[in-house]
Image: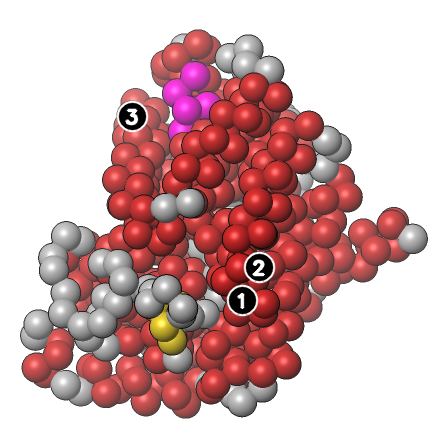
Amino acid sequence: MFELFESFTNWLWTYPVLVILVGGGIVMTFTLKFFQFTKLPFILKQTFGKMFAKTDGDGTISPFQAATSALASTIGASNIIGVPLAVATGGPGAIFWMWLIALFGCALKYSEIILGIKYRVKNEEGEYVGGPMYYIRDGLKLPWLGSLFAFFLMIEIAPSIATQSASFVQSAETINIAPIVSGILLVAFVGFVVYGGIKRIGKITEKLVPIMACLYIVMALIVIGLNFTEIPRAFMLIIESAFTPVAAFGGFAGSAVASTIKAGAARGAYSNEAGMGTSTIAHSAAITDHPARQGLWGVFEIIVATLIICTMSGFLVLTTDIWTQVGASKAAAMPAMAMQTVFGSSFGGGMLTICMLLFVFSTMIVIIFYGEKQAEYLFGSKFAKVMRIVYLAFIMVGALVDLRSVIVLLDFTLAGVIVTNMIGVLLLRKEVKKESDSFFNNKELMNK
C-alpha cells in the first residue's frame, strides 16, 4: 500500500502538478500583459530601491519584513543543492528552463499576494491574517475549498519541518554534533522565535535573510570569479543543452531534452513557491496602501531566490566542472566540492555547512507560523498554539527517525496545497487584473 501511495505521489509531481504550475504562470502572465517585463524598472525601484523605506497604510509588519519572512521560507537548503541536482539529472540546459519558468512565476506570485492583501482580515489578537484560504473562501465563495487548502497546508508543514530538521542534523554531524544535541538546540532556538509571533519573526528574518543570502552569494561569486574564463563556456552549455540531448561523460549519465525541461521547470517552479500560495500568509501582515504595491515584492522574491541564488548555485558547479565529476546520487555534495576547490576542504565545506544551517533555520521559523495560521483558520487560535507544539516536536522527528514515509506525505500534501491554491488564483484572475490596473493607472500611487 505504501509503495502504491508513493508511486501515485511521484506521478502527481511528474505531470499534473508541474503542468498546473507552469500553465498557471503563463495564463497570469498574459492576463497581466507581461507586466514583469514591461514594468521591471519600476518594480526594481519599488523593492530593491525601497527596502527600508517607511510605508503608509494598514498592516502589522513592514513590507520588507513581510518579504524577508516570505523569502525565509522560500530560500532553503534546496536553493544550494536543488540546482546541482537538476543539472545532474537534466544537464546544464535545466538552468535555462529554470530561468524561463521563474519569469512566468513572477506573475503568479504577484497575483497571489494581491489576493492575499485584498481578502485579509484581523484575527482575535488584532493582527492581519490572510492567504489562499481567505481569498478562496471570500473571493470565490467556496469555503469548503478554502478549508481544504488550509487542511493540506497544516498537515504538510509537519513533514516539511522534519525534512528541514534532517538537513540541519546531517550538516551538524559533519562538525561532530550528535543528532539529539542539534535537534534540541534547534527546538530551543526556533521555539524562542515562533513564540514571539509574526513581529519577532519579521525582526529576525529582516536581519538573517540578507546576511545568509549575501554570505552564500559572495562565496559563490569568488569561486566563479576565479574561474571567469569558464563563464562563456558555461553560458553556451546552458543554451545548447536546453534544446539538444547531452551525451554521458565523466560522472554525468546523459539526458534527453524532455528530462532537461522537466528538471529545470521543477526547479524554477519550486525554488520560489510561486503557485503554492504560502508566501501570501506572510505578505498579508504587511503595512501597505495598495495590494499591488505589496505584490511587487513577490517579483523581488523570485529575483533573489531563483534568478540570483539558484543561478549562483548553477554557475558554481558549471565553472568548476564539478558537474562532470560527480553522479546524480552525489549531487548534493557538488556545491561543497566546488567551494573546496578554492577555499580548501575544511573552510569551504565548513562555510557551506553554516550557510545551509542558516537557510534551514530561517525556513523553519516561517513555515511554523504558516502552519499555525492554517490551524487558527480551521479551529481557532487556541488550537493554533497546540499545533505550534506539534511542529516543534517534528523537529526532533526529523533529527532522529527515517524520513522516507515522511517525505512521501510531504509531497502528497504539497500537491494538494498547489492544486487548491491554483484553482483560486486562476478563477480570480479578473480580480487580480482589476487591482493591478487600479494601481498602475494611478500616477499618485505610483509616485509615492
The image's mark for residue 107 is none
At x 59% / y 36%, what residue is drawn? 395
Q: Residue furthest right?
A: 1
Find out whether residue 446 is within the magenta segment: no
Residue 222 shows which numbered tag? 3
Please name which of the two marks, 3 or 2, marks the residue nearer to the observer.
2
Q: What's the magenta region?
A: 350-355
Amino acid of disc 2: Phe
Q: Nearer the viewer, mark 3 or mark 1?
A: 1
Is residue 445 in sight in this rendering? yes
Which of these two is toward me, 316 or 193? 193
Instruction: Report the Cα–Cα distance between label 3 and label 2.
Output: 48 Å
Residue 397, percent across and down? 67, 35
State yes or no: discs 2 and 1 in contact (Cβ < 8 Å). Answer: yes
The residue lying at 75 percent from left, 55 percent from top is 10
- Name the mark on residue 380: 1
Task: Look at the picture and state if 105 lies above or below 138.
Answer: above
The answer to whether residue 311 is seen in the rendering is no
Instruction: Calculate the distance from the C-alpha at mark 3 to the C-alpha at mark 1.
Output: 49 Å
Q: Is residue 413 above or below residue 432?
A: above
| Vertical arrangement, residue 399 with respect to residue 116, above or below | above
